[in-house]
Amino acid sequence: STGLVSNIITQFCVTVIISTLLSLVASFTIIPWLSSRYGKLEHIEGKNLFGKIILGFESYLTRFTDWVSGLLTWCLDHYIKTIVVVLVLFFGSTIGLMGGGFIGGEFFAASDSGEFLVQIEMPKDASLEQTNFMTQKAEAFLKKEPFVHSQITTIGQTSEGLGASQATAYKSEINVKMVGLDKRDEPANVYAAKTKRKLEKILVGAKVKTVPVGILGTAEDATLGLIVTGPNVETAMAFAKAAEKELRTIPGATEIELSVEDGNPEVNVQVDRDKMAALGLSLQTVGMTMQTAFSGNTDGKFRAGEYEYDINIKYNAFDRKSIEDVSNLIFINDRGEQIKLIQFATVSESSGPSELERRDKSASVTVKGQNVGVASGTIVSQWQEKIDKLEKPTGVDYIWGGDMENQSEGFGTLGIALLAAIILVYLVMVSLYDSFVHPFVVLFAIPLSFIGAMLALALTNNTLNIFTILGIIMLIGLVCKNAIMLVDYTNQRRKAGESIRTALIQANHARLRPILMTTIAMVFGMFPIALASGAGAEWKNGLAWVIIGGLISSLFLTLIVVPVIYEIMEKIISKFSKGEKTDYEAEMVADYVHQELSEDGFNPKHTL
């Protein structure tokens, strides 16, 4: 696969591939060698506790095997009812659970890292001292909270967005580290949401926001994102505000904001180009002079030994405080004359957007938000329904950002990987079986595993994300193994002269034990991952539950449904062959003739 998903799961997949190949080598070499040296046949009589447990287990296993064989016989006689029940289970557990909202969709499962950011925003004209005073109130409150372990504060800057490195006097950020999971009874995201409500009552006049910490230790990008584009900022902003209003009505959406804010105070300078040219000034000269005066210019350097320092040249703070300071800015024209800005420009106070954002060469505004307690994919689907009802102005369009953008790419990549895995498994089996039909029967085990996988996700409150889809892809090889064992043994019994029905029942009876053993081993091996509760364990919990659920459902359904499909396929082949013998029946006759001709005294015609 390619893209972001590939970077995340490539190492995981390579590990699985290498370990599987090494286990294959070990099963052909080390295991037989150890068995030949240390294996011995024991006759357990039940004279001790261990023996009684083994005999008791064998008794129950025999009864279970007989029950499964009896159930298979009934299903073979009532194959239409069996297929209907399986179809109901399949569509109910996939379309029903996902469509009903029991299984949400998201790019990553929400993870409890035990850390979050408190971001405080004062009015835009607030000074650094006022922001510091308000932040100290928040620090004092957090210091008394029992679940807070430590905090690191930054005044005048936040780690969110493209302007993370720019100083902003009216903003501050507190990085809150919580105590371990064993010392608290609330997830970090839930505690952060409660903390926000408490701080809003304490920090009157300030906006408070709590944001998860991303993998780089900075503010995590918004999981919910709608990028609205339009011919100009005003048009895009109007539709973005309408979409923001709809998002606020959806449960689970929090920390909702627009990337571009209105009402940012600014000094607007409208230059009269004719006057400017008549006075001997160029737009480049005017622009560079204003930038140097109010933002500074660091072209000059000061060198002290081996070190070099920037020299920032700009107006001092007293000369750049008011609109009059801007109006009286002096320029030198090409004749050496001093000219004030007010002589060729209109200077006024106004308000405008906090920043200018563009997407695909169009003005854009992004509606951003976080999700708490509800999967981001579920919120986006509800949001989509509400946005479709809004009136969209001419020229305005939108695309999904946030997790939905990654989710669409990731799910598409993994969907192709899933399809490729099924095709590759089928082609490998075609070459091994030398048949196109029997591998097709084996593939029916794959949807049977989806039933248990989806039920496991719903029951454990996990979502469909890149890791759970990876678990589904892994299931393909695991569940096909069970079906291969059944089909292969059935073919062996048919070659030995058994009828299709008898061969299927014998295969079911004989292969139940190895199928049960491998499934139980895999399920118990996955339980530690499924039940893990450390930091970031949520990413892997879903993968383990998918494999556990898929293996358990395929254990029972494969033993029943695959034989039913096998018999149906053989009936179809017999019907289309118009009474001619099937390949396996022809093989049986050929084997018998070869055996009889190898003995002396038999006539070929008589033998046939």
Image (cartoon, rainbow, N blue to C red):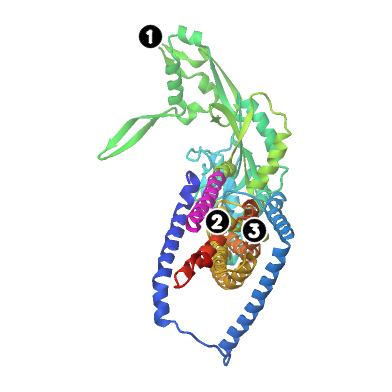
Q: Is residue 280 magenta?
A: no
Q: Give the CA distance from mark 2 to mark 1.
A: 90 Å
Residue range in magenta is 410-438
Q: Main secondary structure of the magenta part?
A: helix
Q: Nearer the viewer, mark 1 or mark 3?
A: 3
Badge 3 is on which residue?
Answer: 565
- The secondary structure type at the circle numbered 1 is loop
Q: In the orientation shown, which residue stands out farthest toward the top? A: 278
Q: Position of residue 407 (x, y in %)?
A: 57, 45
Above or below, 220 relative to 539: above
In the image, is residue 411 above or below residue 245? Answer: below
- Picture quadrant where residue 283 is located: top left
Distance from Cα at disc 3 to Cα at disc 2: 12 Å
- 163 or 450: nearer the eye? 450
Could you tell which of marks 1 and 3 lies nearer the N-terminus? 1
Please report whichever mark, 3 or 2, sits nearer to the chain's N-terminal start. Answer: 2
Q: Which residue lies under the disc numbered 2? A: 439
Q: Amino acid at mark 3?
A: Ile
Circle on res. 153: none
**Is residue 261 at all visible to an observer of this figure?**
no
| Residue at image location 49% in from the left, 38% down from the top | 167
Mark 1 lies on residue: 335
SS for callout 2: helix
Type of residue at label 1?
Arg
Residue 464: percent from the left, percent from the top?
61, 52
Q: Amino acid at mark 2?
A: Pro
Give the quadrant of residue 267: top right
